[in-house]
Image (cartoon, rainbow, N blue to C red):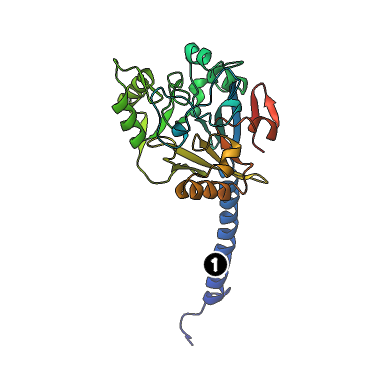
Amino acid sequence: MATGPSRPAGVHPLVAAALFVGIALFVGGIVRTAVDHRQARRAGWRVFALLYGVSEVGEGAEVPVAAEGHASGDPGEGGDCPATRPGELAWSAFLIKGQRRTVLFDTGFDDPAMARRWRVRGFRRVTSIVRTLGVDPEDVTDVVLSHLHWDHAGNVAPFTRARVWVRRAEYDWARSVVAPERFARHGVHWTDVEVLQSIERRGHLELLGDRGVEIAPGLRLHLGGLHSRGDQWLEVRVGGTVGTVVIVGDDAASFASLTREAADAARARLRARMAELAGGEDHVLMSHDIGIWSRFPEVADRVVEIR
Ligand SMILES: [Zn+2]
């Protein structure tokens, strides 16, 4: 007698469905964990400080302490660098490596006359220091310019393949203060602006607005605006015991000024935020702070690694 279609022997459909969902969740979990691990690994950057010279500033030294006004965002005529504390003034740039990117924070300068004027001891071009780390200038994928003063944006041309990140407010301001017949003003040199204009024509200039921008996972640029019209600073996730490093540029002139020179409420707030992000002041790095060179291990000639 016919009994109708019989159920094929094997697993009940509900059990099969449950098994399928279970396996999918399990595999999904493994994949997600692997992706999390990969992202965590990828987000880990290495940060190197590059010392391209040292000057002695202050009373009795060969270089006078620059006008306080320069560091407070009101650059005076002549464009001196913010040496607001007597002592040794470091000239630094920073290299950040990871995620198949090589990022240079500021390019220093390539002007023997300025090196003489500032009595820079042991002056070297940033290009030659990055080579000691096995990095050819053409390998640099990104150049971040904290601002467009001569000692931060004075040597961009050799990094021919890099995308160059700068704030539009800073670029517009720099173009408004110098011209071929007004070579140097407010710390900006016309030749540096010319180089940026040619980079803009090549389509490699990234002009940023006022907001924070993540240029790669774990690498975030913030508007500072405390030192020049549109200066910016960089937050870098290093991971491990270091956590986050903040590269300030000239928003604060020295390590001491980070805590003691909070002249106004906005500055105090910003500096507190930087220190909070960096989990303390040790990992807030200023371009002219000689203290960086004793706080971290030397990994190559004129290079320390932040770790
Ligand atoms: Zn500077």
The picture places residue 153, in percent across and down from the top left corner, at 44, 25
Q: Give the residue drawn at x 47%, y 50%.
A: 265
Asked whether residue 235 appears in the rendered view, the answer is yes
Asked whether residue 42 appears in the rendered view, the answer is no
Answer left or right for 46 relative to 71.
right
- Res 129 quadrant in image: top right
Q: Which residue is mark 1?
A: 20
Q: In the rendered view, tell whether residue 274 sits above or below residue 96.
A: below
Q: Three-letter amino acid code at disc 1? A: Phe
Camera-side residue: 24 or 9? 24
The picture places residue 112, in percent across and down from the top left corner, at 50, 11
**Label 1 CB-ligand 1 distance < 8 A:** no
Q: Give the residue drawn at x 50%, y 80%.
A: 6
Number of numbered discs on residues: 1
For the C terminus, give its image quadrant: top right
Answer left or right for 203 relative to 58.
left
Camera-side residue: 182 or 26? 182
- Res 244 quadrant in image: top right
Camera-side residue: 135 or 224? 224
Q: In the rendered view, tell whether residue 204 sits above or below residue 284.
A: above
The picture places residue 262, in percent across and down from the top left corner, at 52, 45
Mark 1 Cα-neighbour bin, 10 Å: few <14, some 14–19, many ≥20? few
Q: Give the residue drawn at x 57%, y 68%.
A: 22
Pick out the residue farthest to the bottom.
1
Dot 1 lies on which element?
A: helix
The picture places residue 77, in percent across and down from the top left corner, at 38, 24
Q: In the rendered view, tell whether residue 264 sits above or below residue 205.
A: below
Q: Give the residue drawn at x 59%, y 26%.
A: 90
